[in-house]
Image (cartoon, helix red, strand yellow):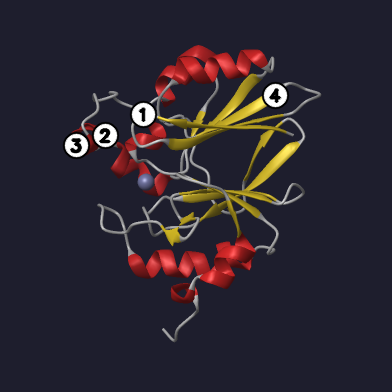
């Protein structure tokens, strides 16, 4: 598996390029910004983007999606529960002081039970609401790798104080879905350094399941 992680934009969103070495097919996850740089990396590996997957509709994760779609022809996938949030990109732009990227069109909604793929590398889509209603994680089981979006970070969890955020839901997503994955699963969070499921489960007392 080819896996390049490029922190993009002023909030340094971890954008992932996942590629298949034999078919040269790729998926690109969270193209928030710096599309020219991403296209250079794709060209370096001789990769063709087949899917653009967005973990949630925050501007730092989705801002460059239309530019990337125009350059590659690949469809943009996002969970439909974030479509309302996607309509607020102009408002989100003012939150962090970046230009309004304009309207982003989604080609298809993806949710739990579906898969996304780059050649032979397939990821299960896990709907993990909480940071936003439509937040998803992507789990590459054979490679033991989780693209976690802003649901789980090294040492913390996603904020829930923005529109669409819900603390109870993110805790449920973490307990019932994310933390049920094997300990040696490498977690690629939406921002910051990599971690593992085992490390986060072991060191996070606030993630211990409480009653109700
Ligand atoms: Zn976010």
Residue nearest the viewer, comparing 79 with 146? 146
Tag 3 and tag 2, C-beta contact below 8 Å: yes
Q: Earlier in the sequence, mark 3 or mark 1?
A: 1
Question: Does ligand 1 reach within 8 Å of label 4's beta carbon?
Answer: no
**Residue indicated by mark 1:** 63
Quarter of the rendering occupied by the N terminus: top right
Q: Earlier in the sequence, mark 1 or mark 2?
A: 1
Q: Could you say whether the residue bearing mark 3 is in a helix, strand or loop? A: helix
* Cα–Cα gap, marks 3 and 2: 5 Å
Residue 5: x, y in percent? 57, 34
**Residue indicated by mark 3:** 91
* Cα–Cα gap, marks 4 and 1: 23 Å
Number of numbered discs on residues: 4
Residue nearest the viewer, comparing 184 with 75? 184
> Alpha-carbon neighbours of circle 1 within 10 Å: few (<14), some, or many (≥20)?
many
Instruction: Inspect this view and state whether residue 196 appears.
Output: yes
Quarter of the rendering occupied by the C terminus: bottom left
**Residue indicated by mark 4:** 25
Q: Residue at x 32, y 38 (%)?
A: 86
**Residue indicated by mark 2:** 89
> Alpha-carbon neighbours of circle 3 within 10 Å: few (<14), some, or many (≥20)?
few
Q: Earlier in the sequence, mark 4 or mark 3?
A: 4
Q: Earlier in the sequence, mark 4 or mark 2?
A: 4
Tag 1 and tag 2, C-beta contact below 8 Å: yes
Q: Earlier in the sequence, mark 4 or mark 1?
A: 4
> Alpha-carbon neighbours of circle 4 within 10 Å: few (<14), some, or many (≥20)?
many
Residue 148, placed above or below residue 121: below
Residue nearest the viewer, comparing 12 with 132? 12
């Amino acid at each position: 598996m080819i896996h390049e992680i490029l922190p993009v934009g002023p909030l340094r969103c971890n954008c992932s390029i996942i590629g298949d070495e034999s078919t040269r097919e790729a998926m690109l996850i969270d193209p928030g910004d710096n599309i020219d740089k991403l296209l250079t990396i794709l060209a370096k590996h001789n990769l063709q983007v087949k899917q653009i997957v967005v973990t949630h509709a925050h501007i730092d994760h989705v801002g460059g999606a239309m530019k990337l779609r125009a350059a590659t022809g690949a469809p943009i996938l996002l969970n439909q529960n974030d479509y309302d949030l996607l309509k607020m990109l102009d408002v989100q732009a003012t939150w962090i002081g970046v230009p309004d990227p304009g309207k982003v069109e989604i080609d298809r909604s993806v949710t739990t039970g579906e898969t996304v793929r780059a050649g032979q590398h397939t990821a299960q889509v896990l709907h993990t609401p909480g940071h936003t209603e439509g937040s998803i994680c992507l789990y590459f089981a054979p490679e033991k790798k989780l693209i976690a979006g802003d649901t789980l970070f090294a040492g913390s969890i996603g904020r829930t104080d923005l529109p669409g955020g819900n603390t109870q839901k993110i805790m449920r997503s973490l307990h019932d879905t994310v933390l049920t994955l094997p300990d040696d699963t490498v977690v690629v969070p939406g921002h910051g350094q990599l971690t593992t499921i085992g490390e986060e489960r072991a060191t996070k007392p606030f993630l211990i399941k409480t009653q109700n």
